[in-house]
Image (cartoon, rainbow, N blue to C red):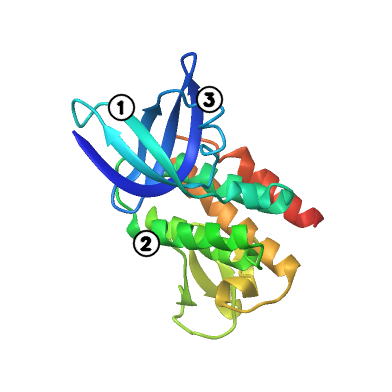
Amino acid sequence: MDWREEGILIGIRRYGESSVIIEMFFENRGRHLGVVRGGISKKLTPILQLGNQLDAHWKARLEEHLGSFSIDLVKSRASLIMMDKVALSGLSSICGLLNFSLPERESHSLLYKKTFELLDLVASKKKWLTDYLSWEITLLEELGFGLDLSSCAVTGVLDNLKYISPRSGRAVSLEAAGDWSKRLLPLPNCLRGFDDGIEDLIQGFLVTGYFLENKVASSLGQKVIPSSRRRFIELIKKA
């Protein structure tokens, strides 16, 4: 068995004395693992950096085997942001969440395209925090926990939406919330497409973080979301 596809490096760990196991995210093949022989060498170490775009050739005797990758660098992203703590932390959070949440060898074409675009934005050092939040919303949708903020879950009205149901992920209007408002999540303006500053954006991250922790992690057997995501949010708060 063998195939070749371009993808994003989202994980790497030591394997034996000189090799590594890498986790790649491909448009057509999803999250896929393989061994890279000599992966800790001086030649390959600069290539095997999180977020880099690689041309990967996978080989195995059987489809279900771990297999091995031979790789070539297509685009280096990590090297462009090495001195930017927030950008590096954001890149690490993106890769960590993909590793944490995606099943192996299951295609997520839309999420791949969104990830590719977001990583290029991060590497370009342009404004990207709002795009990152949008990416987390897409991740939740791809995993079956999408938010529906178009209308009130109780009355169906389109106006004065102020809360989100922590159970359904649907919007709730101020009038419909009533005495239940304290049990609901606030609906930040940024999740409705409005730019209302960094504090509002952080509220948006708290909302997506809630569903990552209480829906996604729970569905995966009470796993804990990557610490890289928490560190990223902390850096944003301090910036």
In the image, residue 114 above or below residue 13: below
Residue 177 appears in the figure: no
Give the structural element (helix, strand or loop) at label 3: loop
- Distance from label 2 to label 3 (Cα)? 34 Å
Q: Amino acid at mark 3?
A: Ser
Residue at the disc numbered 1: 66
Residue at 51% across / 71% down in the picture? 171
Q: Which mark is residue 41?
A: 3
Q: Crowdedness of circle 3 by 10 Å Cα count: few (<14), some, many (20+)?
A: few
Among the 4 quarters of the image, the one containing residue 62: top left
Q: Residue furthest right?
A: 238
The residue depicted at 57 percent of the width and 61 percent of the height is: 132
Mark 2 nearby-residue class (10 Å; few <14, some 14–19, many ≥20): few
Nearest to viewer (mark 2 / mark 3): 3
Q: CA distance from mark 3 to mark 1?
A: 21 Å
Q: Secondary structure at mark 2?
A: helix
Location of the C terminus (image quadrant) = bottom right
Work out whether residue 97 or residue 188 is closer to the camera in this orientation and state it: 97
> Who comes first in sequence, dot 3 or dot 1?
3
Dot 2 amino acid type: Leu
Above or below: residue 159 compared with residue 31: below
Q: Earlier in the sequence, mark 1 or mark 2?
A: 1
| Numbered circle sitting on residue 110 | 2
| Amino acid type, mark 1 | Leu
Q: Residue at x 25, y 26 (%)?
A: 65
